[in-house]
Every structure is written in structure tokens, then in C-alpha cells.
Amino acid sequence: MAVDEIIEQINKLNVLELVELKEKLQEQWGVEAMAPVAVAAASAGAEASDQPEEKDVFNVRIESIGDQKIQVIKAVRELTNLGLKEAKQLVESAPNAVVAEAVSKEEAENCKAKLEDVGAGVVIE
């Protein structure tokens, strides 16, 4: 199987399936996934500076559902392409409900805005 075919198959996975894939790969190879920023800093041997390094990847997490649970589920489905059952399970797992993982700041802000519009309490980490 060519690398492009593998990437094409991965692109078809939903968020929950991607998390499961990550966990199985970590278990299989005995490694832990690290953010690219952390790997680059560690490999370069960079010394800590007074200025904190600006993040370029963010996670979007639902802290609270609010009064419009159904609307929050619909928004999660729109943002993640999850099925109804998976989106409901994800929303109900709040405050540990990570809707978007390792996304750009712009995408994280977009997700946060859509979820807050339907009454969810959202945190960008």
C-alpha cells in the first residue's frame, strides 16, 4: 500500500477513530505522541528564554453543555463529521470533551465561536 493511499484512508476517519488510532500506534510502538513544537525544541537543544514560545496548535474542549444540549450536539456533528451517537457521547463526556485536537488558532477560534453560539462553555488549550 502506497503512503498516499494510507493518508487517504486516515483522512476518512472521524475524531474518535483518530484518537483510537493514535492510542493503538503508541501502544504498538511503545512511544508517546508529542506536539511538533516540543519535538523541535527538544531536538534543537534550545535553552529556555524569558519569552514563552507561542503555540501553533490548539485543542478545543467543551467545559459545559449549557441548556441547549441538542444544539451543541448538532454543532459538534458539523465541526467533526461524527455520527449522532458519537457526537452525543462526546458532548456528554464534558468537561473532558475534546472537539478538535491539534488545530490552528483560527480553526480553534472558529470552533469555539460555533459552540458558544449554542450555549456551550468552551476552552481553547
Image (cartoon, grey):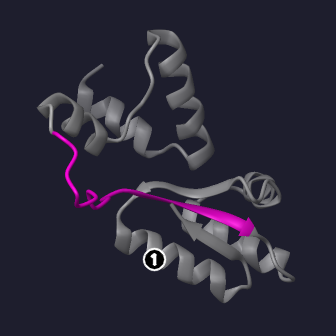
| Quadrant of residue 47 within the rendered picture | top left
Q: Amino acid at mark 1?
A: Glu
Q: Is residue 79 above or below residue 95?
A: below
Q: Which residues are magenta?
A: 47-63
Quarter containing the N terminus:
top left
Q: Nearer the viewer, residue 69 or 95?
A: 95
Residue drawn at 62 percent across, 43 percent down: 16
Q: Is residue 67 above or below residue 101?
A: below
Residue 88 percent location from the top left of the image: 80, 59
Element carrying mark 1:
helix
Q: Is residue 27 above or below residue 91?
A: above
Q: Nearer the viewer, residue 104 or 77?
A: 104
Residue 105 percent location from the top left of the image: 36, 69
Residue bearing the label numbered 1: 109
Residue drawn at 50 percent across, 11 percent down: 28
Residue drawn at 30 percent across, 40 percent down: 38
Q: Residue furthest right?
A: 67
10 Å crowding of disc 1: few (<14), some (14-19), many (20+): some
Quick check: 119 left or right of 10? right
